[in-house]
Image (cartoon, grey):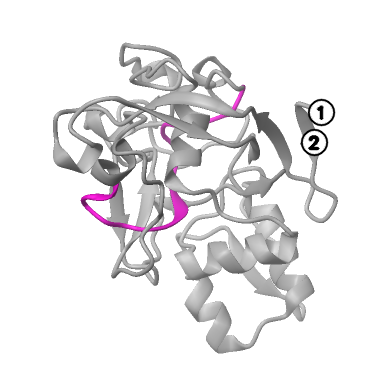
Amino acid sequence: MDWLIENAKDGTLLALIPEGEFLAGGSKNENEGGGPFKVRLPAYYLALHAVTNLQYARFLSEVRPAKADVEKWILLSSGCSVRAQGGGYEEYGGKGDHPVVQVSWYGAQAYAQWAGLRLPSELEWEKGARGTDGREYPWGANWDQNKCRNDKNKGNERTCGIWSYAEGQSAWGLYQMAGNVWEWCADWYEKEAYTRYKGRNLTTPSSGVRRVVRGGSWDNDDTGNFRCAYRRYYEPDFRNGHHGFRCARTL
C-alpha cells in the first residue's frame, strides 16, 4: 500500500495514516474529553497540504456554478486570491500555492465532492496532526512560533505557501496542521462529542448549528489555538480570510 498517493482529479498529494490507536483530546476541559484518551481509527489518507487558490480556481472553472452557489461557497472579495475572469476563474496576486481562504464549509464540501475526496472527521484531522503519541503540537511537546505561520511571524503578510514551515510537519509529514489557516472538518460541533468518544462511542454528531474547524491561523497569537487537540467551531456559511481546508480519502 502506497504511503503517498496523488489524487488524479486535482493533483492533491495524500499521505497514508495507518490503522491503529492514537492519543486524542487534551486538557481537562470537557470540550476535549477531560484529558487524553485512546482512539482507534481505520486507515485513511489525509492531504499533505491545504487546498490552494490555484486548485480552487480550477474547480470553479470546471463546475461553472450558478451565482448563488459561488456566493454560498466563497467570498470573492479583495481578501481572496481567486477571481472571475473571462468566463471562468483564476488565481491572482502570485498566491497560487497559498491556501484558498474565505471558503465556507459548503464551499469546502463542494470542492471535496468534485475532486472525488471528502473532508476529514475531526478525529482523523487530529490523528493526522499529532501522530500517535499525544504530542501537543504537530512537531512536538513545546510551542515554537517559527514552526508555523502565526500572527507573531507573518510580518506584513497573511497566508504563506503550502510548503512553507517544513520544520513544523506532523509525524506523518503533513504540512501546516498548525497555523496558516483554520481548516474545516466534516463534523458538526458538539461540546460533549469527545466525552462520548472517550467512552469508545465514535458516532459523530448527526446534526448541529456549527461545523468544526481545527489548527489555528496566521491571525492568531494565542498559542493554545495551535494545539492539536484544540476544537473550534463556526457556522457552515461563515467565510473569512482565516479559513481554508484540506481533503481526506477513504481507503
Above or below residue 148? Residue 56 is: below
Q: Nearer the viewer, residue 227 or 81?
A: 227
Mark drawn on residue 5: 2
Q: Nearer the viewer, residue 150 or 51?
A: 51
On-image quarter of the N terminus: top right
Residue type at mark 2 is Ile
Residue 5 place in picture, x, y as percent: 80, 36
The image quarter containing residue 169 is top right
User: Residue 197: in sight, yes or no?
Assistant: yes
- Give, as a single range, the part of the protein colored magenta: 173-193
The residue to which callout 1 is attached is 2
Q: Nearer the viewer, residue 119 or 197?
A: 197
Above or below residue 58? Residue 65 is: below
Determine if the magenta segment contains residue 50: no
The residue sitting at 56% across, 65% down in the picture is 109
Residue 216 place in picture, x, y as percent: 35, 39
Residue 214 in the figure: left or right of residue 221: right
The residue sitting at 75% across, 26% down in the picture is 3
The image quarter containing residue 158 is top left
Numbered disc 2: secondary structure = strand
**Disc 1 + disc 2, Cβ < 8 Å:** yes
